[in-house]
Image (cartoon, rainbow, N blue to C red):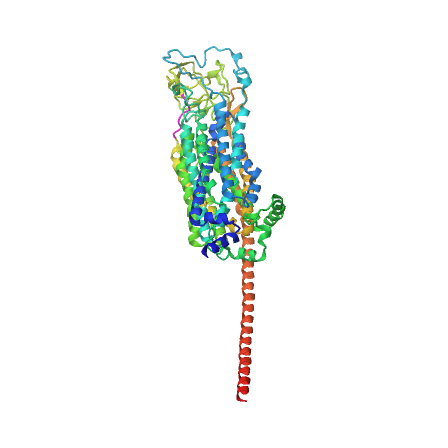
Amino acid sequence: MEERVEQGHAQENGHSDGTAREARPSPCTSLRMFLVALSFAYFAKALSGSYMKSTITQLERRFDIPSYLIGVIDGSFEIGNLLVIAFVSYFGAKLHRPKIIAVGCVLMSIGTFIIALPHFIIGRYEFETSVRWVMNSTNNPSPCPVGSPADHTQDGKLPQVPAAGCEGESNLSMWIYVLLGNVLRGIGETPVQPLGISYIDDFTTEENAALYVGCVQTISVVGPVFGYLLGSLCAKIYVDIGFVKMETITITPADSRWVGAWWLGYLIAGVITLLSAIPFWFLPRSLPMSGPRVPEKCTQEQTSFIKDSSPPKHKYPADEHTSFIEMAKDFIPTLRTLLADPVYLIYLCVTIIQLNSLIGMVTYKPKYIEQHFRQSASKANFLMGVINIPAVALGMFSGGLLMKRLKLNIMGAARFAFSTSLVGYILSLFFFAMSCENAKVAGVTLSYDSADGISYDKHSVFPACNSNCGCSSSDWDPVCGENGITYVSPCLAGCTASAGSGKLTVFSNCSCVGVAGNFTASTGQCPQKDDCDRMFPYFLALSVITSFIISLGGTPGYMLLIRCIKPQLKSLALGFHALATRTLAGIPAPIYFGAIIDTTCLKWGQKRCGGIGACRIYNTTAYRIAYLGLTLSLRTVSFIICIPGFILLSRRLKQEERSALHGALTNGGAELEALRKEEFVIPSSDQSQQTSDNSTDRQTRL
């Protein structure tokens, strides 16, 4: 008898008998297995995604491309999502969701491997330097031979002589591999979120759904911790490790020309992503419910919708073999119904604008730490992974836990998410006060004549002190003079002799340094000891606090998306939300953020075969204003749009309350009328029975 009832429940939920028998022994275990598998998939995709962002400066320098092109590469992930997400979200909900997620994880791993492919195709990394590594060197070539003919320069540049091998080298084809691999990674990531979250929400109670989603989202935030730590580790390792002798490398990880082993992290991330696909192949298509779903699961507004709708029209049971054409015909009407919801549209607009701000900020935050606070790429990634990301993970988990403890309804979740975002916005304004001066670079941020005031006017790099040298203004080979000023190259510092080799090279007779009795310079930029070192810890502390407060509203905000729509439209709404945010936020945000950051560059590098390469030094004041100003301006717009959203949501909830009250009164009146009829029927039947008894008595007496 119990077996029949259990199979009946499975058939009522659209499951086949075979599926019911497979999942029957312990549905809770199957749900836990799915939660673990989905969490691992979230971890893998978050790790590879965060590692991509941690390698931004490495890719810029390796392929000699500006920030806006890095934004195009970063946005190509969202382009991959855009190609298939609507169809995967709609049709995938009617197919075997765990296996579709497994296929997606395999595609993600393949795309990650393709990103690392250029390292094994392109030649060894070569950077601009006048320093040579020579064993037992006693007589090094002069950076600035005295009496060099003046005709060696033309408009401040050396005669353009094509480097050897340029004819067969195409930098474009190399970063195109990275772009295509990221597109494939985006295609593979598509089914993980909409199908995974809808699977959890379909087979768990409403009380546990928020906690489960919060746990999965928390794991997805833990992934970037390891992604940035992996980026920090790989940034310390030289790009051509194993192929060159490290003692011949004349630059350090703090140098703006340094490129770490960016490819190594992609190989590791690809293996982890491939492993995450394995568990989904063994999970069932659906899970049996332990009790009636609708009374316990549906909210007040969703219950009223279910009563007024016909499920066979919009929802295909899992055991019903519906043709692709029938599902396609229903797609446009269903999408039209979804977009007719004003609350959903406003929620969509708010999240799109806020994600523009968030994606642009997170994408270039390590670079901001590098350039503004003069930290190495390795340290910037380490701080992002160890300090900032854990605060976000704790905030996401705490938000889901608070939502369950406080039992927040739709309006409560909306107010909570808005409040946390507003508090984080106010605290973020203090970032403007945490400023650092730019480095003192002769001919870039200050003139050769004045060593005091820093200005961002265009300065000449060819004063009288190096006029006899045939220097190139396009090279970036910084040296630190004894006067504490950085010079673009030993030649532009007027150095005529050098001693030592590699990182220990010391340049002497530098006519532009100008220190009485000491005219030497050493390799690398001068370390700047100023208020910036004392400001950096405060920046990190405020960054942690704001990240935690803003992320508190992450899970309630996401549950608001799930609960403000009709149950039949849930999977499509999640998919379309992901589609819109990726199209209008994920793709353009890194591009225009990068383009604006490029406008603050003071000194561009030069490609080996000619053309502008990666930026070497930025105007930190302009960088800070552009980066923080754009981030906070977008948030301001999103807060303004929230106002009509709250008004519409409040009106909808009041209307649903009135409808529910009216329905309860109508049902109550019908029940009262039925009771009156029962009271009328019972006395009548008693009276007729008594009459029949009396007549029987008369007949007996007669």
The one of 79 and 623 positioned closer to us in this rendering: 79
From the viewer's perspective, is 135 left or right of 578? Answer: left
> Would you say 517 lies left or right of 96 here?
left
Pick the residue in front: 34 or 420: 34
Task: Classify 500 as above or below 336.
Answer: above
Q: Position of residue 194 (x, y in %)?
A: 52, 44
The overriding secondary structure of the stretch rendered in magenta is: loop
**409 part of magenta stretch:** no
Residue 159 in percent (x, y) is at 54, 15
Q: Is residue 528 magenta?
A: yes
Residue 486 visible in the displayed image: yes
Q: Position of residue 245 (x, y in %)?
A: 40, 19
Q: Position of residue 585 (x, y in %)?
A: 54, 39
Q: Is residue 135 left or right of residue 104?
A: left
Q: Residue furthest bottom?
A: 702
Q: Relative to 537, say whether 261 is above or below.
A: above
Quarter of the rendering occupied by the C terminus: bottom right
Q: Observer-nearest residue: 240 or 60?
A: 240
Choose top left, top right, bottom left or bottom right for residue 540. Answer: top left
Tell me what residue is drawn at x 43 percent, y 27 percent: 261
Please count the marks in the image: 0
Query: Vertically, is 182 above or below 524?
Result: below
Residues drawn in magenta: 523-529
Could one spot residue 538 in this view of the protein? no
